[in-house]
Image (cartoon, rainbow, N blue to C red):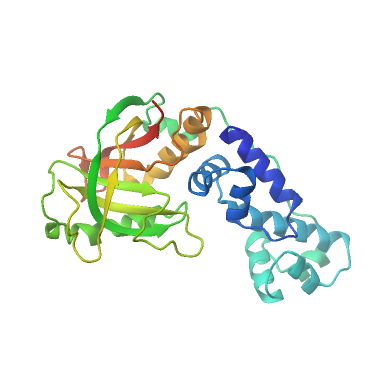
């Protein structure tokens, strides 16, 4: 099964189980994909995380019941898997612009979140300089030391906040290689606990000559040699989500047979990128099979 078929199957599975125990982990497990990579693919293809999609679909179903039945609001809230009517009301108001009670009295249906996912052939971010056809390169084994934390898809701002903390301590790392820094995205790391809701580990790192005695509060990692598809992000870091969405929402699904699904991907920052203005160019390395 490729990523496009997997996404369609995931959406169908969610639709069939909206009133049951659903979680991003159970959805990824149902279709047999790596949780780390499938979270990223789903977000890029649909514009929302698996958890966000589940919540929106449950709220949409709840809105329909408000209009078509006299079922008590608290029962609808519990069936939508909210812990209380208060939490349901907050989420409903945020999505539909009014409370469940006002919505029911109005008897005017709002647009309901649809089931269909439309994938445009060319996403708008292509105009920002993303390489449509990546370079294919071989990269040798890499040893890195850096600061790490767990994140979930879409936390670009939070990942960005890790870098200044790391750069303030980079002088503590011994036997570094000069010329570039790395951002490493991995499914897990033995020294980093995934927090609730998080799906991957990100490491702001420096390349090193050996992994002995990393500074306190930092982690070490050996990145195996691999073949990579290399994409170049051009422009401010604020536009990175566009590039990410092209890579994981368009290129990777079209090349799912080539994608090495259980390997970390890399961001390589060199002299082309200005860390003060957060602008310039840097490369994103997506591992592929030989």
- Residue in the picture at 43% in, 55% down: 155
- Residue in the picture at 46% in, 55% down: 152
Q: Residue furthest front?
A: 212
Q: Nearer the viewer, residue 105 or 49?
A: 49
Picture coordinates of residue 94, whole percent (x, y): 62, 63
The quarter of the image holding the N terminus is top right
- Residue in the picture at 60% in, 49% down: 29
- Tell me: residue 277, above or below residue 71: above
Q: Is residue 218 visible?
A: yes
Q: Is residue 257 left or right of residue 60?
A: left
Q: Is residue 202 left or right of residue 175?
A: right
- Tell me: residue 86, above or below residue 253: below
- Residue in the picture at 13% in, 44% down: 177
Task: Give the number of callouts.
Answer: 0
Q: Is residue 242 left or right of residue 169?
A: right
Q: Nearer the viewer, residue 279 or 133?
A: 133
Q: Is residue 107 visible?
A: no
Picture coordinates of residue 270, whole percent (x, y): 20, 40
Q: Nearer the viewer, residue 113 or 15?
A: 15
Rendered image quadrant of residue 89? bottom right
Picture coordinates of residue 63, whole percent (x, y): 77, 60
The quarter of the image holding the C terminus is top left
Rendered image quadrant of residue 45? top right
- Tell me: residue 90, above or below residue 40: below
């Amino acid at each position: 099964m490729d990523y496009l078929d997997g996404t369609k199957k995931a959406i169908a599975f969610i639709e069939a189980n909206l009133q049951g125990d659903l979680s991003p982990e159970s959805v990824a497990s149902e279709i047999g994909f790596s949780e780390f990579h499938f979270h990223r693919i789903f977000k890029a293809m649909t514009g929302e995380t698996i958890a966000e999609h589940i919540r929106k679909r449950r709220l949409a179903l709840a809105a329909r019941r408000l209009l078509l039945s006299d079922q008590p609001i608290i029962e609808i809230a519990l069936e939508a898997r909210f812990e209380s009517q208060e939490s349901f009301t907050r989420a409903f108001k945020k999505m539909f612009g009014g409370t469940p009670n006002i919505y029911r009295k109005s008897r005017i249906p709002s647009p309901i979140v649809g089931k269909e996912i439309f994938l445009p052939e060319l996403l708008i971010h292509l105009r920002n300089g993303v390489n449509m056809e990546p370079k294919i390169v071989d990269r040798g084994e890499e040893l890195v030391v850096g600061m790490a934390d767990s994140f979930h898809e879409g936390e670009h701002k939070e990942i960005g906040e890790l870098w200044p903390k790391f750069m303030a301590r980079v002088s503590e790392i011994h036997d570094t290689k000069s010329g570039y820094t790395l951002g490493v995205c991995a499914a897990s790391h033995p020294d980093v606990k995934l927090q609730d809701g998080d799906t991957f580990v990100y490491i702001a790192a420096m390349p090193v000559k050996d992994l002995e005695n990393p500074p306190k509060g930092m982690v070490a990692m050996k990145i195996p040699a691999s073949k990579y598809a290399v994409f170049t992000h051009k422009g401010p870091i604020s536009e990175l989500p566009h590039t990410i969405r092209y890579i994981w929402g368009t290129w990777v699904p079209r090349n799912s047979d080539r994608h090495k699904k259980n390997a970390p991907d890399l961001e390589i920052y060199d002299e082309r990128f200005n860390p003060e203005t957060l602008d310039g160019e840097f490369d994103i390395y997506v591992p592929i099979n030989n």
